[in-house]
Image (cartoon, rainbow, N blue to C red):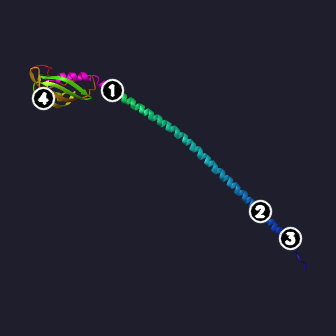
Amino acid sequence: MIRINLLPHREERRKTLRQQFFVLAGLVAVLAGVVWFVGFTYIENQIETQAEKNAFLKSEISVLDKQIEEIKALKEQTDIMLARKRVIESLQANRSETVHLFNELATQIPPGVFLRSIKQENQKITLVGYAQSSARVSTLMQNLDASPVLERPLLVEIKAAQVGKQRMNEFTLAIHITRQTNDAPPKKPAVGAGKPGAKP
């Protein structure tokens, strides 16, 4: 009977399988390293790209902030210029206001009424004067109320006073002036108007 020793063949096969296993494990390790390297490189590239985008956005935001500051400065300058323009327009529109006021008072004061003082604060005007009677003060208030330049007459005070040898009524009257928009004098006449100082 022939005997065959299979032990060397089995050892050779085991050695071959062991080598194949190590080779396969090495290949898997190399493949895993390549995958890790590719993934790491991709993530690093993504991070760098995002960092560049963030830096770009920051620079653009900085530029926009500067532009916003410039716009605010321009707006402030525009507001200042508009305020100056309004002041100039107001001065131009009302430069003849005093002339209109005195012309209108001279037109509206009825006979028997004399003014002692005129005081203006903004649009409010305070008249202090003398009248021969309280009825003439009432006529003056009616004339002022009908005036296109003056409005809202208000009698503050009226009292008896001695002017020379005449007994008069001293009055204090408050009125408001209407802002004029042109230099043309008012043309609307007042009822019962006369020259100041005229006798009835």
Considering only order in the chain, which callout, 4 or 2, is on the residue closer to the N terminus?
2
Q: Main secondary structure of the magenta part?
A: helix
Q: In the rendered image, which quarter is residue 190 located in? A: top left
- For label 2, the SS is helix
Circle 2 residue? 22
Alpha carbons under labels 1 and 4: distance apart: 42 Å
Q: Is residue 80 above or below residue 12?
A: above
- For label 3, the SS is helix
Please report contact status of discs 2 and 4: CB closer than 8 Å, yes or no.
no
Quarter that holds the C terminus: top left
User: Looking at numbered disc 3 in the image, what kind of residue is underneath it?
Assistant: Pro
User: Looking at numbered disc 4 in the image, what kind of residue is underneath it?
Assistant: Lys
Nearest the viewer among 158 and 181 is 158
Alpha carbons under labels 2 and 1: distance apart: 98 Å
- Say which mark, if any, is on residue 89: 1
- For label 4, the SS is strand
- For label 1, the SS is helix
Q: Residues within 10 Å of mark 3 (few under 14, many from 20)?
A: few
Considering only order in the chain, which callout, 2 or 3, is on the residue closer to the N terminus?
3
**Is there any visible trace of residue 21 in the rendered image?**
yes
Alpha carbons under labels 4 and 3: distance apart: 148 Å
- Say which mark, if any, is on residue 24: none
Q: Residues within 10 Å of mark 4 (few under 14, many from 20)?
A: few
Circle 4 residue? 159
Q: Which residues are magenta?
A: 85-110
Circle 3 residue? 8
Please report contact status of discs 2 and 1: CB closer than 8 Å, yes or no.
no
Residue 55 lies left or right of residue 117; in this view the side is right
**Number of numbered discs visible in the structure rendering:** 4
User: Looking at numbered disc 2 in the image, what kind of residue is underneath it?
Assistant: Phe
Q: Residues within 10 Å of mark 2 (few under 14, many from 20)?
A: few
